[in-house]
Amino acid sequence: MLDMDLPAEAAMLAALEEAWTDLLPASCPATKVLDETLLEKLIADGDVVNERFMRPGNGDPEGTRVAGGRRPSRSGLVVKPESPLPKKALVPKGRVTAETIVSTATTTTPAPIEPATARGLAIQIKPHHNGEIFLSVTAVLQNPEFFKWPFTGWSIPKKAGNLPYPQLDPDPVVNITVYGATTSPLLTLFAYKLNTIYYTKKSEIRITASPLVSVVPEYSVMIIERGEAHGIDYEITIHTPDSPDYAAWVAACNQAMPSGGKEPRKYGWF
């Protein structure tokens, strides 16, 4: 039998018991007793998956599951975003414009841009009535690999005789979740094909998501991250100004876009 330091062991056990006690509902406001009512609420909010939908062969009548995940929801706790990358860390090499990069789209010559490592982009948006949302060309040039730039496809003009525009082809497949004042999403779009073009006349990167128009006000923050689920290119989360997380994400946007005299939109890499 091994010799044991009983006082040290007792002290360690007491520390573990104290740590556990500190997490009980009486001491920790984030801990609640799990009962039938709370469980039903967690399932309704999407925080817990109904067990019968986890069994193979069962359907999903509530639409809470999709390929690669379930209907997203928040815990209600405000999580501060990580610090944005400094602007200087994402400066393109030399004098490079969107036009010069677009000219390489049909050649094998790579664009003279140094890729930057970033997990995602946070950007304030202004959805237009037709569903178009303008991104930042400067942001795309700072990290072209993230957006699969330059675009090698071409749009199909709605009117005969109009010139096509460079387009990301195929359309990226994305999951979009919009949050407002509550923990439940205002809107969720799963496996949505996000049309993305470069509008050369005005040097604008435009994406189209018509379902966002009625629920996403101006200056909401869109967070774009690479998708992890099979078949999903990007995971997109949008916080409206009513969201408890909104202010923290605005603070994470450390670069301003041209405004034309209006309140400038901002963005930031993280």
Image: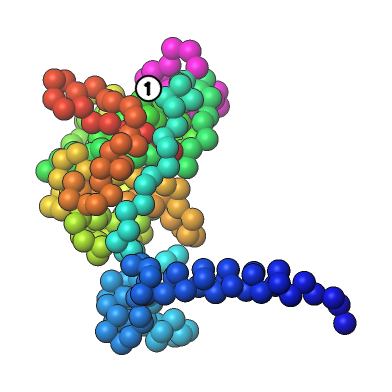
- Would you place residue 239 above or below residue 190 in this image? above
Q: Within the image, what quadrant is residue 247 found in? A: top left
Q: Nearer the viewer, residue 246 or 93?
A: 246
Front residue of 132 and 2: 2
- Give the quadrant of residue 257: top left
Residue lying at 37% horizontally and 47% vertically, measured from the top left: 80
At which x and y percent is residue 50? 37, 81
Q: Main secondary structure of the magenta part?
A: loop
Q: Position of residue 184 (x, y in %)?
A: 24, 64
Depicted 15 relative to depicted 35: above or below: above
Q: Residue at x 36, y 25 (%)?
A: 138
Quadrant for the C terminus in the image: top left
Work out which residue is located at the far front of the displayed protein and give it.
7
Q: Which residue is mark 1?
A: 98
Quarter in which the N terminus is drawn: bottom right
Q: Looking at the picture, tell me which residue is in the foreground, 78 or 142.
A: 78
| Residues shaded magenta | 93-111
**Residue 166 appears anywhere in the view:** no
- Left-right relation of 108 to 173: right
Image: 71 above or below 155: below
Quadrant of the image occupied by residue 161: top left
Q: Looking at numbered disc 1 in the image, what kind of residue is underneath it?
A: Ala
Q: Is residue 247 magenta?
A: no
Q: Is residue 4 left or right of residue 209?
A: right
Count the marks: how many?
A: 1
219 up-or-down from 211: above or below: above
* Figure colour scheme: rainbow
Residue at 20 percent across and 55 percent down: it is 180
Q: Is residue 223 visible?
A: yes
Q: Secondary structure at mark 1?
A: helix
Judge by depth and name the residue closer to the eye, 196 or 213. Answer: 213
